[in-house]
Image: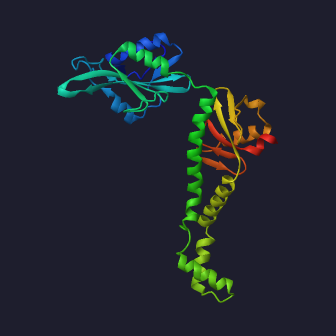
Amino acid sequence: MYANIQIPSNLALDPFLAGLVVKLALDMPAFTFSTKGMSKQDLNYATNPSAMQDSKIKPPEGTEFLREVRVYAGAEHLGSLAIDRRYKGRGGSDDVYCIRSWRIDNQRGNANTSSTSKLGGAVRIVKKAFVTMNVAEIVGKATGELHQSYVGALRDLSRPIEGSAMVPNTTVMQRYVYLLLRNEEIPEGLDKKIRDDMLSDKYEKAMLEYLLAAKMRDMQMAIVVQHANLFLYRRPKLDVIEQKTFDELPLEVQNAIAVLQLMENNELVDDVGYRHNDRYFLIVDKLFDV
């Protein structure tokens, strides 16, 4: 087995897929062919006890044939290689290589997949599509993911208060406010109900989260991506993407990244920023000017 073909010991490449993977492993030694990132469900779907083209061919004892691998350049996921059987009219079929990459943009069918029954054609597709991202593409991809997850995080923090999930029904609330503003006597039971709900630890936590979301929603944020040994960042309203080592970043930005690296995914930190994952961050923009 080639050093850059890294699959679990209980799996063996399907002979049909192996022809493509071995060819590419030789031609592109910097790429790694593995099951990294595949879920248990993915692996269940991609394995079989028989070869696809000839069911009489069995893998070594204690293993199953693997019909899909993912391709990486370092930590960057470039795409995946799989094999499949495509059925045609009148009972015919073709065994095909399926090359999946975000760079592939088909007008019909699966927009990010190209298929061919020819080994040479599959190799050409891979060499054209499996190209590492440039700086603009790296930050562009991060921008889309960050925006979607950040909006979701703000919505989740705001929902209990905005949806009035933590307080009595609106009729009760209106009656309480009406009496309070008119300086009229508030019945003891009504007062107790409002105080028990709105002075509880749960309500306090929900309100603090709502106020945090409201505050952070209005802040200007810089997109920051950790890529290899560099930090790439783009500040609001600027098209320029900066590249710096951690030590070259402003001290306040270093501190912000250090704090966010300790947080859970999809977590906000007041006056600091937002962590989507261990590589994608939003940092309060004014910290770059400190």
* The C terminus sits in image quarter: top right
Residue 254, horizontal then vertical, whole percent: 75, 37
* The N terminus sits in image quarter: top left
Q: Residue at x 18, y 26 (%)?
A: 91
Residue 7, horizontal then vertical, whole percent: 42, 22
In which quadrant of the rendered view does residue 252 lie?
top right
Whether residue 3 sits left or right of residue 254 in the image: it is left
| Rendered view: 211 above or below 56 | below
Residue 63 in view of the camera = no
Q: Residue furthest bottom?
A: 185
| Rendered view: 236 above or below 155 | above
Q: Residue at x 56, y 63 (%)?
A: 160
Q: Residue furthest front?
A: 107
In which quadrant of the rendered view does residue 125 lie?
top left
Residue 87, horizontal then vertical, whole percent: 24, 27
Q: Residue furthest right?
A: 290
Whether residue 51 sits left or right of residue 234 in the image: it is left
| Rendered view: 26 above or below 271 | above
Residue 168 in view of the camera = yes
**Of 171 and 218, the residue lying toward us:** 218
